[in-house]
Image (cartoon, rainbow, N blue to C red):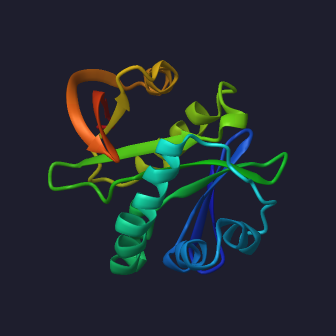
Amino acid sequence: MWQIVGNAMIEIYSERLKLIPLDNDLLTLWFIQSREKMERQLGLNPSNWQIEDFFKAETLDALVNFWLPMTAENPDNFFWYTNWEIVLVAENISIGGIGFAGFPDQDGVTMVGYFIDGKHREKGYATEAINCLIDWASLEPSLKTIIADTPFFNLPSQNVLKKAGFREFGIAEVHHIEKMQVKNWKLKVR
């Protein structure tokens, strides 16, 4: 289920989660001041994520080099270019992030990525969040396919994608902060 709250801000709800897309103002607050100030602005309890150094570096890189510039460039469609906070409703705390790599391209393709705080893994939250975001994104008529990649040995993340209906279609070497081998996944939406 999703709803619009103030100034056309969308929130998506599932059984245990709420997904909140960060607009450019919230991303700027995170970058200039702190994540904690941004969380407080959203009315959330501070999360103090426990994530691996790789994910910290990848998140900072996405914040600076993608989310901030792309949400500034696409203010009316920022939902496709930002981090959506994954909020555990029972604790009113962010337990991770999820988002797309942009509005579907001319072939109807976009990419999804996600992570869950180390304290909240293996509880089904990533699967619940990705299914919520896919349901919302499926309302966009131009969306045909969602792709994802996972580090080759990240079996929990691969299982999340399998549960969400993704199918493996290849292996590649990419450079996300560091060079790594990944499995490629896709989900046909229409």
Name, please, the residue furthest toward the right.
90
Indicate whether 103 appears above or below 50.
Answer: below
Percent across and percent down for residue 89 are: 78, 49
Q: In terms of depth relative to the viewer, which is nearer, 35 or 97?
A: 35
Percent across and percent down for residue 144 are: 26, 43
What is the quadrant of residue 92 in the picture?
A: bottom right
In the rendered structure, the answer to whether residue 27 lies left or right of residue 49 reads left
What is the quadrant of residue 190 in the picture?
A: top left
Q: Is residue 135 visible?
A: no
Picture residue at 35% right of the left edge, 71% below the top? 70
Percent across and percent down for residue 8 are: 56, 75
Q: Is residue 112 visible?
A: yes
In the rendered structure, the answer to whether residue 70 lies left or right of residue 14 reads left
Indicate whether 6 appears above or below 157.
Answer: below
Q: In terms of depth relative to the viewer, which is nearer, 5 or 69?
A: 69
Picture residue at 51% right of the left edge, 39% below the top? 130
